[in-house]
């Protein structure tokens, strides 16, 4: 069956450390993989997209890797801040279908 | 710039009552439109998507339906709500290329009582 698994429901880290979130998938062949941030009671906000032929993408303190052999993406937030506390969702975009499949998310808490 | 509007923000409805949630997009034409539902502590479940006026694809065969009467308007409906319809409903749009990801509305918290 098809699955998208994000490593844990919750992740707690200390301010200034690097947060690493994992997204694993099975029985999908995504053309793109996307990461979103969701705050409580709000809609998700798009952060980064990485294509199947890209290994790594960076944006400010964010870094995403994509390994289509391992069927895994890693999402890093360096020099984390309490304001980074939120739920982070990974999403697979199969492109040929007009939809996207989301993982359940990892709730990140950055403690001061 | 493009904006997406979704309303109402919260809704409490009795079981068996009808539902109508509306979503509109501004600043773009011919967007792909989506309705998602998010249950507490769970991922987003795709309900419907539309690539054009009158074109609706359903992912979940339930007592919900969707319509797209205008290019930038997407409506989620039900004739009779069930308790299991409670959740956080999100509308989203994307361009045909989707390289910029999806843009979500602010969501509607629906509680069926």
Image (spheres, rainbow, N blue to C red):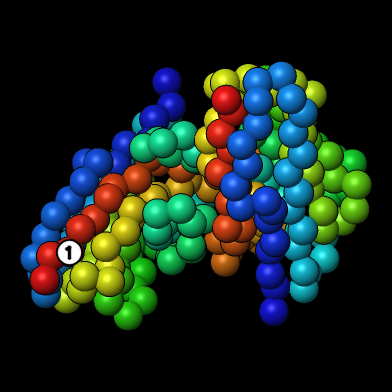
Q: Is residue A78 visible?
A: no
Give the answer, above or below, for where A85 lies relative to B92: below
Residue B22 drawn at (x, y percent): 76, 49
- Mark 1 element type: strand
The chain containing the residue under callout 1 comes to A
Give the answer, above or below, for where A39 lies relative to B86: below
Q: Which residue is located at x 29 percent, y 47 percent?
A: A106
| Residue receiving disc 1 | A110
Q: Is residue B103 visible?
A: yes
Residue A82 drawn at (x, y percent): 21, 70
Q: Is residue B38 left or right of residue A73?
A: right
Quadrant of the rendering where the N terminus of chain A is positioned: top left
In this view, the residue in front, A13 or B12, is B12
In this view, the residue in front, A105 or A94, is A105
Q: Residues within 10 Å of mark 1 (few under 14, many from 20)?
A: many
Residue B61 drawn at (x, y percent): 68, 20
Quadrant of the rendering where the C terminus of chain A is positioned: bottom left
Q: Which residue is located at x 48 percent, y 63 percent?
A: A46
Residue A34 drawn at (x, y percent): 45, 56
Q: Is residue A95 left or right of residue B1?
A: left
In this view, the residue in front, B34 or A109, is A109
């Amino acid at each position: 069956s098809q699955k998208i698994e994000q490593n844990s429901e919750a992740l707690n880290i200390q301010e200034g450390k690097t947060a690493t979130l994992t997204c694993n998938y099975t029985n999908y062949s995504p053309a793109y993989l996307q990461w979103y941030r969701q705050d409580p009671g709000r809609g998700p906000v798009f952060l980064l997209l990485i294509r199947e032929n890209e290994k790594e993408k960076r944006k400010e303190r964010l870094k995403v890797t994509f390994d289509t052999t391992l069927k895994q993406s890693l999402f890093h937030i360096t020099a984390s801040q309490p304001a980074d506390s939120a739920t982070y969702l990974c999403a697979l975009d199969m492109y040929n279908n007009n939809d996207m499949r989301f993982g359940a998310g990892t709730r990140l808490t950055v403690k001061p | 710039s493009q904006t997406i509007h979704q309303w109402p923000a919260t809704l409490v409805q009795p079981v068996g009552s009808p539902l109508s949630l509306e979503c509109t997009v501004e600043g773009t034409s011919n967007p792909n439109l989506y309705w998602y539902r998010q249950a507490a502590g769970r991922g987003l479940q795709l309900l419907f998507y539309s690539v054009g006026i009158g074109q609706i694809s359903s992912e979940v065969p339930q007592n919900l339906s969707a319509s797209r009467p205008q290019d930038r308007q997407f409506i989620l409906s039900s004739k009779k709500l069930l308790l299991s319809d409670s959740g956080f409903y999100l509308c989203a749009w994307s361009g045909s290329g989707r390289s910029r990801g999806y843009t979500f509305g602010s969501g509607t918290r629906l509680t069926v009582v």
